[in-house]
Amino acid sequence: MVGKKKQVTVLVFLTPFLLFSQVDRQDRNPLFKPAIRDFTHYTFAGQIGMTVTNYGILGEGYQSCVQPSCRYKLYSEYKQEQIEHFSYAGLWVGGIKNGQTIVSSAIIDGFVSDEYGSRPAGREFTSSADSADVIKIKSTFNKAITDPVIRELASYYDSTAVSHQDMIAEFTDTSQVIPGTDIQVPHTPLGVKVHLETYCWNYPYANSFVILDYTIENISGEQIINPYVGIWVDNSVGNMNFTSICEPGGGWNWYDNRNDYVDSLSLALQSDLDGDQGWAQSYFGLKYLGSKNAVSAEDFDVYYDQWPWNRGQISGVDHHLTPIGDNEIYERMHLYPGSEYTTITESASWMSLLTAGPLGNSVDLQFREVIWEPGEKINFAFAVVCGLWATDDLNDTEERRGILYENANWAQRAYNLGYELPGPPPPPNIYVVPGDQKITIYWDNAPEDSLNADAYDPVSQIIDFEGYRIYSGRKTGVGLGQTLIAQYDIIDEFEVPPVGFINYNTGLDPIRIYDEDGNPTTKEFIIEGDTITFHYKYVDYDLKNGWPGRNWYSVVAFDYGNAEKEIPSAESAAIKAYAIPGTVGNPGLKREIGVYPNPYRATADWDGFGERDRMIWFTNLPPKAEIRIYTLSGEVLDIIRHDADTYDGSDIRLLNDLVFGKSPKFSGGEHAWDLITRYNQAIAAGLYLFSVEDLETNDMTIGKFAIIK
């Protein structure tokens, strides 16, 4: 972490001793970086949002409360799952040149507060002085659909892209100043040019890792002996939603983290000790994937080390200190083979270091040295992997790590397949229409359409579409999750069933759209100015009107897997659509206008915790209406204008928190009220009157409702 380390604490839960005994963890002032240093881009195709720079550093140090540093899950609607995993990480490259040990490091703990002052090491890679030398983005997506993320990625379509989002950066360690400035970067360069490509996907089986594929060229003009490469990480698993560091006294405790290393997976990991009361129940993982230049199987190894931030000492592990100077740093890069690592159980603000080597182009058998020749390149890859706790156990068990391990194995498989991942069908476009105690879901046939290039598997080049699954917000129990409410698959048979595949052979006829004569037809909706044709529909009945948050839906397409590569059936990414069921527009006041719940009790299930997190609904409203709320004495407490064409719930904080920003669909005949008067006061318990005027016919309805607190 740059500058002083500021313990990110939650004041409510820490003792006075902790509040005053920890050193300042983070300099809250953003670092000065000329525009040429690109630090504004982050991965967003999958569930990991990780900042990537063009000078060797990953993460943005929690300088921004908007841009993720390494956030997972990026797109979860549950705030408990929107977890940060590290502040900074960076590349290290070390070796021996002309008898001198040299390590070029992008970043290391122990900096003073100024970015380029006296320091032990770090900040030694720079971009060029070319203003075009910024992060490049490419994508394999070539069709913009209703999902805004895929639509944005499609704008970066490139036929040479490897993944759904490639990010490409180049930098060197040879400059003594930041190009284009007079800012000094005092260090002895090893003499390397780095080409980094990061890959990420939105496939559900591949959206929890980001691959870092490095190709490094020796531009020093000299042989580099026994080169080692690695990634240093300032881990910190915590949640901005627990309390934000952008708020006074906000944040989380960095000093209750535990690290470990799993040799069989070449995986370094960290978790928060207690999970912050459910707000940080996730693992960070850094995995070594492999290299095309490990020329000496006998001497090559993967190494792991950890130490407390900025030379902090932990009882019994005093030899695990921040390395100072190139000799110590290089030694640490190959001091502890992962196979010999002994777990340190004490919690602290742990740094992680995962390295591999030696990597080179040839081997001197006499001196048992790996040689990296001038002008030659070495390639290697790591993966940043995340995974939520598989169990709620506060003890760090193998079972609790299950999801992380599964995601790490998928990252390794992606590397082994040369990044040619069998892809599930693309997601269909989806549109939802709320009605009275029901929601109708429409979707198109994009996953099975032979004219859609994205429908073809990138490996097999065939359309391996098998069917559709319809998910909704969790219908039973409490907590996070989703419910599979229906599944339909095409009628076919397999001589050898794919791995884990269950073939129901329902056919797709039950969900096709039919006209009045029973013939298949289509339905068109105008979405964001484009007319999209839909082929299927499903109706979810018996819903509670007005219920916010739980009524989201996604339709995913699934394939039959890849038996040859032992890959099970996979689903497309889920495009979620939000809707709130309710009565439709009531022209001419043909139905009785009312209020629910009536009487209203302050402990309504959908309520939040504060007085401004409450809500009642006016129902059976005309398309355009004026609602007035009165006391029994006739005082007007609030006036609400309702327009079915434009109503979006944005005037209600509870709806904002639950669904606003996700373009929820409303039925048109209902309008929520938060029990706050036009004088910005919460109403008291009692009996109230209301009137509703149809603004098109001037018809009037009067009613009453009760508030019980």
Image (spheres, rainbow, N blue to C red):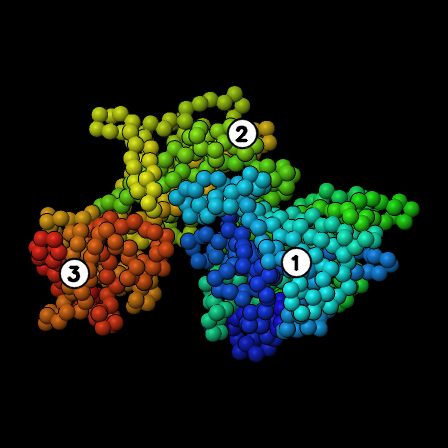
The number of discs equals 3
Q: Residue furthest right?
A: 366
From this view, report whether residue 250 is shown above or below residue 673. below
Of labels 1 and 2, earlier in sequence is 1
Residue nearer the viewer, 702 or 265: 702
Seen at 16% across and 61% down, the residue is: 627
Picture quadrant where residue 344 is located: bottom right
Check disc 2 and give the amino acid type: Gln
Classed neighbour count for the residue bearing mark 2: other residues with Cα under 10 Å, few (<14), some (14–19), many (≥20) = few
**Furthest-top residue in this view:** 495
Residue 534 locus on image (x, y percent): 33, 35
Q: Earlier in the sequence, mark 3 or mark 1?
A: 1
Label drawn at residue 461:
2
Give the residue type that dot 1 points to. Ser
Which one is nearer the viewer's eye here, 276 or 458? Answer: 458
Q: Earlier in the sequence, mark 2 or mark 3?
A: 2
Classed neighbour count for the residue bearing mark 3: other residues with Cα under 10 Å, few (<14), some (14–19), many (≥20): many
Residue at image coords 48%, 53%: 74
Q: Indicate the secondary structure of the residue bearing disc 1.
A: loop
Position of residue 351 measured from the top left corner of the image (x, y, whole percent): 66, 62
Q: Position of residue 368 (x, y in %)?
A: 87, 48
Q: Which residue is mark 1?
A: 128
Screen quadrant of the C terminus: bottom left
Q: Residue 268 location, x and y as percent?
A: 65, 54
Q: CA distance from mark 2 to mark 3?
A: 58 Å
Residue tagged 3 = 627
- 46 relative position to 636: left or right: right
Instruction: Locate residue 59 relative to residue 649 in the image: left or right.
Output: right
- Above or below residue 38? Residue 262 is above
